[in-house]
Image (cartoon, helix red, strand yellow):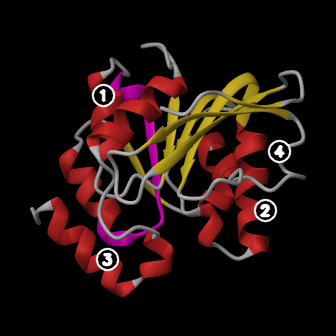
Amino acid sequence: MRAPSLLFWRQYLRRPLAIGAIIPSSVYLARAMVDALGAAAGDTVVELGPGTGVFTKRLLDSGISRDRLILVEFDHGFARFLAAAFKGVTVIEGDARQLPGIIAERGYVRVPRILSSLPLRSMAPQTRSEIASAMSQSLEPGGTLVQFTYFTAPPLPEAAAAEFSIERTRLVLANIPPAFIWRYVKGGQRRQARSSLT
């Protein structure tokens, strides 16, 4: 099996805009993202853009069951790596824009938790809007979506985020580049709160 760091660089050199970062996310960002998600052991969690599995490992370490974790990865090389590295976890090579259909094929109408590492703000506006809509359709009322970004602005387009409460929860400095974590709760009171960033 190819080492994760070497695989990351190979895929980055092939498609830098699609990867969206110059090195894999840090374990500190992974910990903060999973903490913000607040998933219980029995929750079904969809992870979008898992890459080499830094967040996947943290999700499993936090108690999420392998049979309750669904990874959706667009990149063929990453998808193959993930399937070999995380036995028992559902790995789907697919497009996040098709997320409602992807989870429907696995017997879910909606899921309670989505964790996304997709480089949304590097994408074309139309693609970004379509992915945001797909995530919203796939998340159950009261469910939580967590997304990080390297920008201070919210990662989801304003129109797509209309049915969410929004909170910027953390700035993780121990990551290259430093990353902001945003939490979206579907059906919550419409607001945009910004906590102290630590």
Gap between marks 2 and 3 measured at Cα: 24 Å
Compared across the picture, whether 177 is left or right of 188 comes to left
Query: Mark number for residue 11?
Result: 3
Query: Closest to the observer: 34 or 136?
Result: 34
Query: Closest to the observer: 98 or 59?
Result: 59
Disc 2 marks which amino acid? Ser
Compared across the picture, whether 159 is left or right of 152 comes to right
* Residue drawn where x is 69% and y is 24% of the image: 143
Bounds of the magenta segment: 65-77
* Residue drawn where x is 24% and y is 59% of the image: 81
Quarter of the image where the N terminus is located: bottom left
| Residue 113 on the magenta span | no
Q: Residue 182 location in percent, x, y?
A: 62, 39
Secondary structure type for disc 2:
helix
Residue 108 location, quadrant: top right
- Residue marked by disc 2: 129
Query: Mark number for residue 60?
Result: 1
Gap between marks 3 and 4 measured at Cα: 30 Å
Disc 4 marks which amino acid? Ala
Gap between marks 1 and 3 measured at Cα: 24 Å
Q: Residue 192 location in percent, x, y?
A: 81, 34
